[in-house]
Image: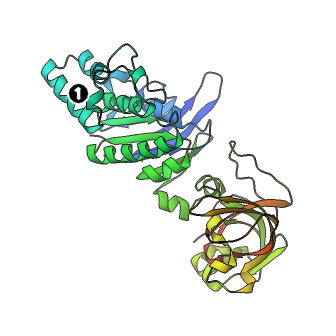
Amino acid sequence: MAGVVFDHVDKVYPNGFQAIRDLNLEIADRELLVLVGPSGCGKSTALRMVAGLEEITSGEIRIGDGVVNEVAPKDRDIAMVFQNYALYAHMSVYDNIGFALKLARVPKAERDRRIRETARVLELEENLSRKPGQLSGGQRQRVAMGRAIVREPSAFLMDEPLSNLDAKLRVQMRAEIARLQRDLGVTTVFVTHDQVEAMTMGDRVAVLKDGVLQQVDTPRNLYDRPCNVFVAAFIGSPSMNLFQAALDGGRLSVGAAGFDLPASVFDARPALRSFDGARVIVGIRPEDFQDPAFTTDDASGSRLATTISLVEALGSELLVHFRLDAVPVDAGDPDRVEELSREANTVGRFDPRSRVRVGDQTEVAVTLSNLHFFDPATLDSIHR
């Protein structure tokens, strides 16, 4: 097995477009790292550079102890799983899985052993004689994974392998891939635009925007301590609510609403004290808005009056949309259309027992201790 390292890597196309800018990233041996970001952020380009399908402009890519900049793709000891499966339609599942071994002239008995063991792991034993056209989407994806696994490579590269599956099957397959990766212990780089996939699968997640690495951390840390406005809005579904705000003497003003912040907020974020009398950006996760009937926070100062505009009942929770008299902040996600008006559409994640209805004029409780703060000049997090 082997780790993968990007060392000051740039990728500039002949037309001058820079897809990757000074990428420094180390994927540890046996780690599952997810590259995530909006369309066009450079995540697939980064993966293709590891595979040798894209030349790098400058910097180094290392797999294990060796620099692979000039190494041919077939000699990099990696296996790639593509979005479209890339199976041979005229071949059986058995022959698809074993094709690379046949090309490598692995002895027939050893080839048969490895194919059948891989099929057993992927629960494809009963399908070995079938053609890809006779399989479901999930089974075809398993065959594509089997073709990678059977080679016993140093690293797996997966380029949005679940995007062609339906929602239920995606959930099942992402759990299977994560389990297989742990069982096999193979270094894996997994590319997706779906941040839910990223958060549920990765040991660590690397967030890219415009070819620049924004933050790499565990899923929990990305969610709890985003380094900037973009990461804060991109990680989490529904997205973090972001508003222009102001601090004055310990009181936070968000549009027409005002909150007296407890001392614990400043104690947890000492740098926030230097913004007293200045503007900030405040971020509020949907779960930190709640129906007051289902929160222990009974302080009137942490509530705001609003009108409910939409309720999405998801069974385990309610996604409640309401209007807040505050100016929203554009987080810079090109895949998300921001409604930059004075009346911000705000989303809260309510207890499913809540009885709020569309059109209700009600109060919404805010958990002040969980607020996120960002510098409006740099868009970076205000923390220590």
| Residue 248 picture quarter | bottom right
Which quadrant of the view contains residue 140?
Answer: top left
- Relative to 99, is 196 on the left or the right? right
Q: Which structural element holds mark 1?
A: helix
Residue 26, percent across and down? 41, 46
* Classed neighbour count for the residue bearing mark 1: other residues with Cα under 10 Å, few (<14), some (14–19), many (≥20): many
Residue at left offset 65%, top offset 76%: 367
Please name the residue that numbered disc 1 is placed on. Answer: 115
Identify the residue shown where x is 30% and y is 38%: 64
In the image, residue 283 above or below residue 330: below
Question: Residue 3: horizontal and vertical position, in percent?
Answer: 33, 42
- Residue at the image point whose x is 58% and y is 54% from the top: 235
**Quarter that holds the N terminus:** top left
Vertical placement of residue 113 versus 174, above or below: above
- Tell me if residue 178 comes above or below residue 162 in the rendering: below
Instruction: State the image coordinates of residue 263 (x, y, percent, origin top left).
Output: 64, 85
Q: Is residue 89 visible?
A: yes
At label 1, the amino acid type is Ile
Give the x, y percent position of residue 12. Answer: 58, 29
256 or 43: which is nearer to us? 256
Drawn side of residue 299 relative to residue 277, left or right: left
Question: Seen in the image, is 97 located left or right of residue 344?
Answer: left
Coloring applied to the structure: rainbow
Residue 325 visible in the picture:
no
Give the residue at x 19% y 23%. Answer: 111
